[in-house]
Amino acid sequence: MTIPLAALMARAVELARNGGRAVYPNPMVGAVICDDAGTILSEGWHQCCGGDHAEVDALKKLGRPATGLAMAVTLEPCNHFGRTPPCSHAIVAAGIKKVYIAAHEPTEKACGGCDYLTSHGVAVEFVPGFEAELAEINRFFYTTAKARRPWVTLKAATTADGFIAPPGGGRFAISSPEALVEGHRLRAGHMAIAVGAGTVNSDDPLLTVRLVEGPDPTLVIFSARLELKTDRKILDRAPIIFTTVADGGRIAPLAARGCRIETLAPGEGSIGRALKVLWEKYRINSLLVEGGAALHASFLAEDLVDEMVRFIAPLRLGEGIALAEPTEADRRFRQHTVSPCGVDVMKVWRR
Ligand SMILES: NC(=O)c1ccc[n+]([C@@H]2O[C@H](COP(=O)([O-])OP(=O)(O)OC[C@H]3O[C@@H](n4cnc5c(N)ncnc54)[C@H](OP(=O)(O)O)[C@@H]3O)[C@@H](O)[C@H]2O)c1
C-alpha cells in the first residue's frame, strides 16, 4: 500500500499552525506518526518555546514503542542540545524507521538531523509542495535564521490623501473600529512594537493589544537624542530604548524606572545595529514599527523592511505629516493583499 504522503504532511502543517505565537522565536512545527498503511497513530506539535518539539510530542502521545513506524514532520528534526535534547536522537531511540520532511533546518546550530538519522539507519525522504506555506507561517523564523535580525513590518493608518497626523503632529482619530481591531491583531502577532520619540512625546501611546486576546509585545523606542517627556506612560513598561546618548545623568532616571537603555554609536546603520541587538540580546523575532513618519523613513533608508501594512481611511486632511505609499518605481515591494476593513482599506506590501 502507498502511504498518502501529501495528506500526511498537510495534516502535519495543520498541526504546526497550532503553535502560533507561543513558540516564538522558534518555528511552528507539526508531526504525525503513522503505520505502513499511512494510518495516523499519533499527532504532535511544538506548543511553546522551551517545550517539547513536535517529534517528541508525537512520540510521547503515541504511548507505545514506535518501532517500525514512520513519521512525517514539517521541519528537519533538530540535531542539537538547546533547551531540549536533539529530536534526531529521540527518533532513533524510539525505533522510527522512516522520516518524511517538508523543509530543511536553516540554522547552523540545529542542522544535521537528516545526516544523523541516515547514519543511524533511519530512511529520510523530502516531501515537496509545502515550502511556500511553511515559509509563510515561519517567516519570522526564516528571517532570524538567514538575516540574523527580526522580521520588520511597518504599519500606519493614513487618510485617503496620505497623511498620518495633522500639521504639527498630535493624536488624530483616523481608523475605523474594524481597522483598530486589525491593528491590535497585528500587534499581537509580533514580539515587539517600535515607535519613534516624536510619537511617544506627541501621543503618549499605550501600544497594548487591548482589543484582542494575546500578550502585550515588548516595547521599543528609538530616540537618538533621548529627549523623552518624563510623564509618558510607556516609560513605566520596561521599553528597550535605542539612543546615541551616553550621558549617565540622562540615562540613570530612565534606567531606574526599568527602561532598558541601549546606546548605539552615532552614525550610519543605526537601525541595522539596533535590529541585531533586538535579535541577539533579546531574541525578538518580529518588530511592528508603528511610526511615525521619521522612524518609517529611517527603516526604509536602511532597506530593512519586510512588509508594509496601511489602513487607509476615507478621510482627507489636505495637509499634515505625510507617508507615501510604495510606488510602481519602488521595485523592492509588491502589493500582497488589498482588503476592506470597515470603511477603511487594508493594503499589504511584501518585499
Ligand atoms: N497614523 C499613524 O499610523 C501613526 C502612527 C504613529 C505615529 N503617528 C503620528 O506621527 C507623528 C510623529 O511622527 P514623527 O515623524 O514626527 O516622529 P517619529 O517618527 O515618531 O519620531 C521621530 C524620532 O524618532 C527618532 N529616530 C528616528 N530614526 C531614528 C534612528 N535611526 N535612530 C535613533 N532614533 C531615531 C528620533 O528621535 P530623537 O528626536 O530623540 O533623536 C526622531 O526625532 C505623531 O503626530 C503621531 O501621532 C501616526
Image: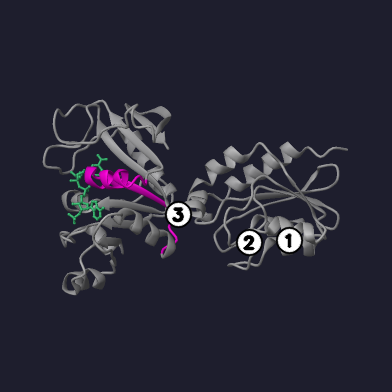
Residue identifier under label 1: 116
Q: Does the rendering let one see residue 182?
A: no
Q: Is 256 rendered above or below residue 152?
A: below
Does the closest atom of ligand 1 sit within 8 Å of the Cβ of label 1?
no
In which quadrant of the rendered view does residue 320 lie?
top left
Residue lying at the far left in this picture: please name it: 168
Q: Amino acid at mark 3?
A: Asn
The Cα atoms of the two marked residues, 1 and 3, are separated by 28 Å
Residue identifier under label 2: 52
Q: Amino acid at mark 2?
A: Asp
Residue lying at the far front in this picture: please name it: 268
Q: How is the image coloured?
A: one colour
Q: Which is more foreground, mark 1 or mark 3?
A: 1
Q: Is residue 286 magenta?
A: yes
Quarter containing the N terminus = top right
Q: Earlier in the sequence, mark 3 or mark 2?
A: 2
Q: Earlier in the sequence, mark 1 or mark 3?
A: 1
Q: Amino acid at mark 1?
A: Tyr
Q: Is residue 192 magenta?
A: no
The Cα atoms of the two marked residues, 3 and 2, are separated by 20 Å
Residue 32 lies, in percent from the top left, at 72, 48
Q: Which is more foreground, mark 2 or mark 1?
A: 1
Numbered mark located on residue 285 in the image: 3
Labelled pair 2, 1 in contact (Cβ < 8 Å) = no
**Crowd around label 1: few <14 · some 14–19 · many ≥20 (10 Å):** some
Secondary structure state at the residue bearing disc 3: loop
Stretch of the chain drawn in magenta? 282-304
